[in-house]
Amino acid sequence: MLRSGKRLFCTMADDNHNEFTFGDVRCDSFGGKTVFLCDSLSYESVISAMQSGSFYCTREPEIFELTLENGKVHIECSQAQRIALSTAGRRSKALHASEGEYVTQADFQLEDEDVYFRIEVTGPSGKKANTNAYFVEDYNHPDK
């Protein structure tokens, strides 16, 4: 859908059945969340973030910063095994941590054919965080 120009957002939520008690590794409660970037915890601020796409989804990793400047994407996150960029042209790039280590930031250069990009962060336990897709044309204006 993204490749055909549909601008949609990702979300994450639980599909829990509470078959296992809290603390059991098989417990599926609180497995996924959508993190909103809000000025305040008010109805207006949350709805504004939801409508503008100012959020990301995660099962564990945190994303602290994501910027696009001069065709370069920069991301800062909690400890990760892998940070990967995907684009509209099905091009992908990834930064992998060395064994026993973690990465907490990455830089990716966009190509002219990259209509949009999105980032996936894989945390220490293999759980992932995903950004929304960002369309490059929205950020190629002098006022942005």
Image (spheres, rainbow, N blue to C red):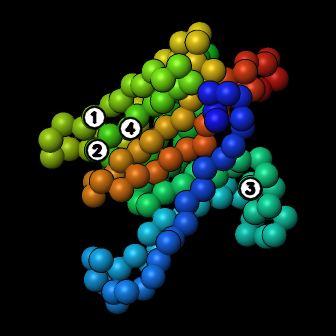
Question: Relative to 31, is 87 above or below?
Answer: above
Q: How much space separates mark 4 and mark 2, taking CA atoms?
A: 7 Å
Question: Relative to 143, is 20 above or below?
Answer: below
Could you classify mark 4 by the number of other residues whose Cα lies within 10 Å: few (under 14), some (14-19), or many (20 or more)?
A: many
Measuring from the top left, give residue 65's x and y in whole percent: 54, 42
Tell me the element at label 1. Answer: strand
Name which of mark 4 and mark 3 comes first in the sequence.
3
Name which of mark 3 and mark 1 comes first in the sequence.
3
Q: Is residue 128 visible?
A: yes
Q: Amino acid at mark 2?
A: Gln
Residue with the mark numbered 4: 83
Left or right of 114 on screen, residue 139: right
Measuring from the top left, give residue 72's x and y in whole percent: 54, 21
Question: Relative to 120, is 22 above or below?
Answer: below
Disc on res. 96: 1
Residue with the mark numbered 3: 50
Q: Is residue 69 visible?
A: no
Q: Quadrant of residue 68?
A: top right
Q: How much space separates mark 1 and mark 2, taking CA atoms?
A: 6 Å
Q: How much space separates mark 3 and mark 2, taking CA atoms?
A: 28 Å
Left or right of 129 on screen, residue 127: left
Quadrant (top left, top right, bottom left, bottom right) of the C terminus: top right
* Residue drawn at 30 percent across, 77 percent down: 26
Residue with the mark numbered 2: 81
